[in-house]
Amino acid sequence: MAVSGMRHISCVGLMRDKAKILDMLQKEGVVHFASPAEAMLPKTAETESEAETDIVIPEPETLLADNQAFIALNDKRAKLQKCIEELARYDTRKKHLFSFLRSVKAAEVAEVDSRADEILSEADKIIATDSAIKDAEAEIARLDSEILALGPWTALPYAPADCDTAHTATDFLAAGSRKEFEEFRTAFLNAVSPSDICVLNEEKNGGAVSFAVTYLKSDRLIAEKLYSSVRVTRFDLSGMSNTPEAQLSLLKAQKQQKQDEITALTENRKSAAQHLSDFEILYDSLGIRAQKMLADVNISDSSVTFNFDGWIPAKQEKKIAAALTDDFICHVEFRDPAEGELPPTKLENRVLGSSIEPVESLYSLLRYGELDPSAIAAFFYALFFGFMFSDAGYGIMLTVACAVILIKCKLKASMKKYMWLFLFSGLSTIFWGVLFGSWFGNVVQTVTLGKFALKPLWFDPQDSVNTEHFLAFTLLLGVIHLYTALAMKAANLIAKGKWLDAVCDVFFWYIFYTGEILFLLPYIPYYKDTAFCAKAHPYGVYLLLAGFILILFTKGRKSKNPFIKLFGGITCLYSLVDMLSDCLSYTRLMAMGLATSVIINVFNSIAASAAGLETAGITFRFIIFILIFVAANLFNFAINALGAYVNACRLTYIEFFGKFYEGDGKEYTPLCYNTEYISVEPGDSAENTGAVS
């Protein structure tokens, strides 16, 4: 449970060694480069906030926005990424449930990098193939539209282009229904004479009617005016030199040709999937180069020398110093962070503490110098998750699933931490499920028709007798959680040497809140009738008054206003309500815990009733019970696991972190092999890593 101590590094070296030094530092992966603008920021606490407001430090990507080499490199990566996404569906390599980085030796990266032009040329072919497939698909869509539109006219025995004569004209129309056709026919024959109407196609049950009308060309204006006034659609087939049936066959042949073309192109793309591994390696190799270019932005150059500032973990100082001074001519200095400086934050936790780091990252990055609460937060997170999930059967499912994934799958770091968090949460779920006697609810009692039941080691929350006990216990958990948060606040203050603040801003509040709790004990279910409650209540009044007086005269101690300095703590009266509302937030533990177990039991009853276990006993109908039981419990598992995850995060973020967590830390982003598809293994010699330089 610690934040790694950071040391500031300043290095001056010869320009001729710059590329090799960057290669070495990237291979070590521990140096966080600081921009020159950041290095020039004021280092005093009084000017820190002002400096952060007035000086804007541009991102390295912004500084390289006009760098043609960087732009070209990113264009190549975008091209490779597109190919990887296109070929992924044809990947025949062994698939894993979760994504992971494939181990690749540096020599293999070097070999692929030497064929970069060849691989990029192959990528161009794949992109061209993909473009050709999309063009062919668009052409097929157009042909389908023409085929659909031509269908009603296949009964016409001659080409539409040959229908017109020197004195007559023929138009092709469609009406939405038989009724609309009859209305048009009557109106047209009355308005245009002589004329002829020939029905070519009619859908069943009074559907659309397609027909041709022939009339004298001198009546064209009358006919066209009638078309617009009556609900019919006119089709322009005048340019068709084939019969509709012949044209339809031609269109179908063209469509088949395009489909064959797509098939051939798809086969080519499938065969190109053999290059997928090369694309992934080259993509990450180019990414490694891009990372060095971004780091290079933070390096100041002259004609002969270069220099950079940055941060490294204190444990790596000797190793980096030796690597720089033994192999290169350079001057290196290390120092502790100056007052007002904000080094990047690097967390160093064991399995329990690191498991909650992904959840913490969704909240805010821990600020350097602040005590790391990860292990404590992870313990309470798993505790609350299990309390809300609270079924031993579900806990076993979750624990076994996470254990198998951790053993069998090669996971990325963040996913691995999540799996550990859910594994701990599964163990907690088993613990609470055993205490509350829930093993897939009351399935044993249901299946045995009440002859057997797994009794709780503590109490059954669904029993109305225990409702007050369950509620009171969730409030107790809330008080413990909040008091732990205050303890973390005190620890942070003491670590910074602010002993007076720890006493006034934490210890006095402990007195105040403890007095409130003891004062309210007579009104808390389950505990109100205990002997301890009667004895503790009077002391609660004294502690509440003592805490109020202490806070009243110390809370405003830092203010220059004499009135606020003396009576700044008057607002602490509001904290009485605030503390009570925080404690009531933990009643969601009871609600979620009951929801899980009650829903399971309801599903068990439904499954038993549907299978007729009460009358049929254990017969073929037992299979029906199993099917319903499995489906219902999988649904309940998913929905309540999600609810437990969300609500555990809510209690962690708002109730726990909200009391002491400062956040707003700077992310530790060292120059390293930050890859998406591969993990580069060190080669036998320096030449093996040259390809990723």
Image (cartoon, rainbow, N blue to C red):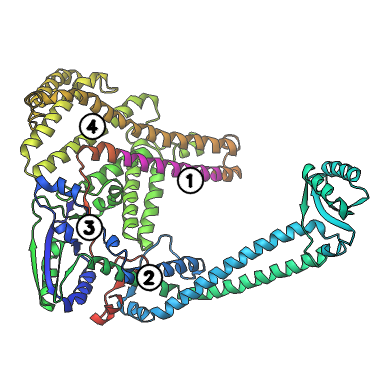
Can I make out residue 207 in this image?
no
**Residue placed at 25% from the left, 57% from the top?**
58
Q: Which numbered disc covers residue 634? A: 1
Q: Amino acid at mark 3?
A: Tyr
Can I make out residue 674 in this image?
yes
Instruction: Find residue 46 and report its horizontal and vertical position in percent.
Output: 9, 45
> Left of 464 or right of it: where is 663?
left
Q: Out of 543 and 559, give the one closest to the viewer.
A: 559
Give the total number of marks visible in the rendering.
Answer: 4
Quarter containing the C terminus: bottom left
Q: Which residue is mark 2?
A: 283
Q: Are marks 1 and 2 in contact (CB under 8 Å)?
A: no
Q: Amino acid at mark 4?
A: Val
Locate residue 115: give its quadrant. bottom left
Q: Out of 627 and 686, give the one closest to the viewer.
A: 686
Q: How far apart in space, not on screen, are marks 1 and 4 (Cα)?
A: 34 Å
Q: Amino acid at mark 1?
A: Leu
Q: Which numbered disc covers residue 668? A: 3
Give the magenta-colored segment's residue range.
Answer: 626-650
First-in-chain label (3 vs 1): 1
When the figure is inspected, residue 541 is found, relative to residue 254, above or below; the finding is: above
Q: Out of 93 and 131, give the one closest to the viewer.
A: 131
Under tag 4, what secondary structure?
A: helix
Q: Which residue is mark 4?
A: 479
When the figure is inspected, residue 48 is found, relative to residue 518, above or below; the finding is: below
